[in-house]
Image: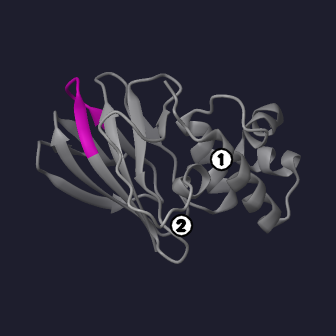
Amino acid sequence: MSSLPLGAIAANLQRERARVGWSMTELARRAGVAKSTLSQLEAASGNPSLETLWALATALGVSFAQLVGSQSTDVTVIRAGEGPRAATELGGYVATLLSASPPGARRDLYLIDAERESPRRADPHPAGTIEHVVLCSGRALVGPTDDPVTLEPGDFITYAGDAPHVFEALESGTRAVLISEQR
């Protein structure tokens, strides 16, 4: 189901790894992923999970979108069901990148599709990350792991993304817009 731009991911990983001066072995160690997985990604192959990409982004100190996005100044239209999508390893949670933050800007925009019984428990993102969520349909438990809030369609929440947090669909077909802001 992945429609991730593997070529862009490969180029972005190589660029960011070179920026910090790490070997593949060092980045794999810091991200807690297998070196073979990283090697596949830098060769533009494989099918990375959302967890793997987040771990790599966090280790490199960049946003998820900086790894999966390509920069464009043209008009961009992403039709429903299209766009670079990353799913969790166990399924039931898919993040579609709608807009990657260009250099100098500090926000990324995602469309989240989540199913019941597939909670997304996220490890802390880079320091200063704030997440904003608007629930479009369904119901969800969202926010800090130790104090999540039940959202109904149209509800909005903001919380620290640099602390453990959760997005758990309480109904099938739950959909939200998530904005990840790096301060």
Q: Residues within 10 Å of mark 2 (few under 14, many from 20)?
A: some
| Residue 169 among those drawn in magenta | yes
Res. 34 in view: no
Nearer to me, 44 or 148: 44
Q: Return the residue found at the far bottom.
A: 104
Q: What SS does tag 1 mark? A: helix
Q: Is residue 143 left or right of residue 63?
A: left
Secondary element under disc 2, as helix, strand or loop, is loop
Q: Position of residue 59 (x, y in %)?
A: 68, 55
| Residue for badge 2 | 127
Which of discs 2 and 1 lies nearer the camera? The answer is: 1
Q: Residue at x 16, y 33 (%)?
A: 138
In the image, residue 108 lies in the stretch drawn in magenta:
no
Residue bearing mark 1: 9
Segment tinted magenta in the rendering: 168-176
Image quadrant where residue 52 sits: top right
The answer to whether residue 129 is left or right of residue 9 is left
- Decide: is 145 above or below 49: below
The reply to whether residue 130 is in sight is yes
Please indicate whether residue 83 sits to the left or right of residue 70 in the image. Answer: left
- Residue 38 in percent (x, y) is at 77, 39
State the residue at coordinates (53%, 26%): 89
- Name the amino acid type tagged 1: Ile
Q: Residue at x 28, y 61 (%)?
A: 158
Indicate whether 168 appears above or below 92.
below
Among the two numbered marks 2 and 1 on one chain, the one whose residue lies closer to the N terminus = 1
